[in-house]
Amino acid sequence: MNKLLKGSLAGAVGVALLLGGAGTFASWNSTVTAGGAATIAAGTLSVTEPTPAAPGTWTSTVGTNAPVPITSIAAYKAVPGDVLTYTKVLNISATGDNLKATLSLSGAAITATSSSTFDTKLATALSSSAALTANLTAVTGGYSVVKGATTVTVTATITWPFGTSVDNSAQGGSVNLSNFSVLLTQI
């Protein structure tokens, strides 16, 4: 090997040894508080009865007839074709931005009073048609809930469909409405 090549190789090895074994390289960093951070608080959503609690009202409608008040829902004998309507004033309290909610009947609003076929068929027929509405602004999938306290009138409508074929399976059946409750759920 010539002297120039040996000298170049020796120099390259020396530089490599110096760079690799001479210590660590330094890196820098810096942090600053951006100033946009703040604390946040969770909102609330509740539905309650007014104080003192006022009873709701039941009415019955058949076809295009005017609604007739029901003085005792416990004594009422429903038949296919009946449309039962329950109206009640409730309070909604909402705190939170962009809050939307649905109002619905709870899952146990209409239940069979026993496990008899008549009771379960009647509960199924009435539950499948039960719907709840409110005097709030409707939005897709529910209602727009106004921030703050709102008094709202809710209306539950239970339609017992009148069919073209005979079905006596719910005749004489009985349902329990004592758990008739309204569920307010954020969407």
Image: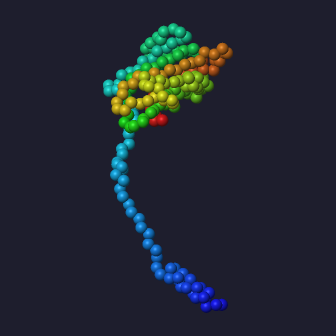
State the image quarter where residue 162 is shown: top right
From the top left corner, tell me how far across and down residue 168 is, in percent. 64, 18
| Residue depicted at x 38% and y 42% | 42
From the top left corner, tell me how far across and down residue 173 is, in percent. 57, 21
| Residue depicted at x 59% and y 18% | 161
Left or right: 167 with respect to 174? right
- Count of marks overlaid on the render: 0
Say above or below: 9 vs 151. below
Left or right: 173 with respect to 68? right
The residue lying toward the viewer, choosing from 120 and 187, is 187
From the top left corner, tell me how far across and down residue 123 is, in percent. 56, 25
Say above or below: 157 vs 41. above
Q: Is residue 113 visible?
A: no
The residue lying toward the viewer, choosing from 115 and 19, is 19
| Residue depicted at x 41% and y 30% | 145
The residue lying toward the viewer, choosing from 18 and 3, is 3
Q: Quadrant of the N terminus?
A: bottom right
The residue lying toward the viewer, choosing from 123 and 93, is 93
Q: Is residue 28 visible?
A: yes
- The figure's colour scheme reads rainbow
Residue farthest to the right? 165
From the top left corner, tell me how far across and down residue 94 is, in percent. 38, 34
| Residue depicted at x 46% and y 35% | 186
Left or right: 30 with respect to 114? left
Say above or below: 138 vs 171. below
